[in-house]
Image: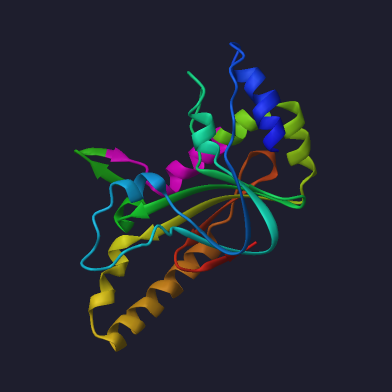
Amino acid sequence: MKQWLENQFAQHYDTQGNRHVVREDVLVGDAALHDAHACGSCIPFFSSTCEHETFRIHTAHPVSCLALEEFFNGFRNLPGERCDVMLVDERKVALVDMYCGMSDYLEPHAVDGKKTIGKKAKVRQQIESALTRLCSIPEIASFLAGVPEKVGIFAYRAKDEELFVNVPRQVSRSMNMFLRLNKAQNERRLSLPMPHGFVYVMHAFPALYEW
């Protein structure tokens, strides 16, 4: 995938012939990814810290993590929206966008008196847009068509729910259990079809995503 992005994708979207490099990390075992934008402007809640963790993942074998948004941003006037990273191996591909912030913004809400669709729907749009750009390259489209499992993941961390860290331990444990149950129920309900055989799902911190 890295070679297709740096060669075929770059040649298609940059007619000037500039060189574009996609940053790649290899994940194995337990790993944690974070939303760089949120972490850069985060105001810590009381004495808690997120330690730059938004999406926790476990994989028993190496998985390539490609910094997709960073790569897309290197192109002038590239159409469409972006998602944070692509996770890929020979049997599975995930397009992941991360959010760390207030839970009120997940659903439709008002900003300066104007209604907005909320992060849950917005991230789906971003992933679908990124997928459209990727599948405009025949080599990438062919590879994705042959991968058995394809997901778009909205990985989020609701900072306001972590306010319970400073309440008595027993209350905090009960509240966190309640929140995790609600999140699990919501995630099971949300499994929406996307183009090119992808499925859109949500994954809430601090649950570990099993690759």
| Residue 108 in view | no
Quick one: 185 or 102, which is closer to the camera? 102
Q: Is residue 57 above or below residue 196?
A: below
Residue 116 x/y as whole percent:
32, 40
Q: Residue at x 43, y 71 (%)?
A: 182
Residue 99 is left or right of residue 7, and the answer is left
Instruction: Report x, y in % for residue 42.
Output: 28, 52
Left or right relative to 20: residue 169: left
Image quarter (top left, top right, bottom left or bottom right) of the C terminus: bottom right
Residue 174 figure quarter: bottom left
Residue 16 position within the rendered picture, expressed as x and y whole percent measured from the top left: 58, 11
Residue located 43% across and 59% down the image: 53
Is 117 covered by the magenta stretch? yes
In this picture, which residue range is highlighted in magenta? 115-129
Residue 180 spot, x, y in % from top left: 43, 73
Occupied quadrant, residue 197: top right
Residue furthest top as drawn: 16
Q: Overall secondary structure of the magenta stretch? A: helix
* Residue farthest bottom in this picture: 170
Identity of the residue drawn at 65% across and 46% down:
198
Indicate whether 27 appears above or below 68.
Answer: below
1 versus 33 height, above or below: above
Colour logic? rainbow
Q: Nearer the viewer, residue 172 or 47?
A: 47
Q: How many marks?
A: 0
**Residue 22 seen anywhere in this rendered image of the structure:** yes
What quarter of the picture does the N terminus occupy? top right
- Within the magenta stretch, is there residue 147? no
In this rendering, position of residue 186 left or right of residue 3: left
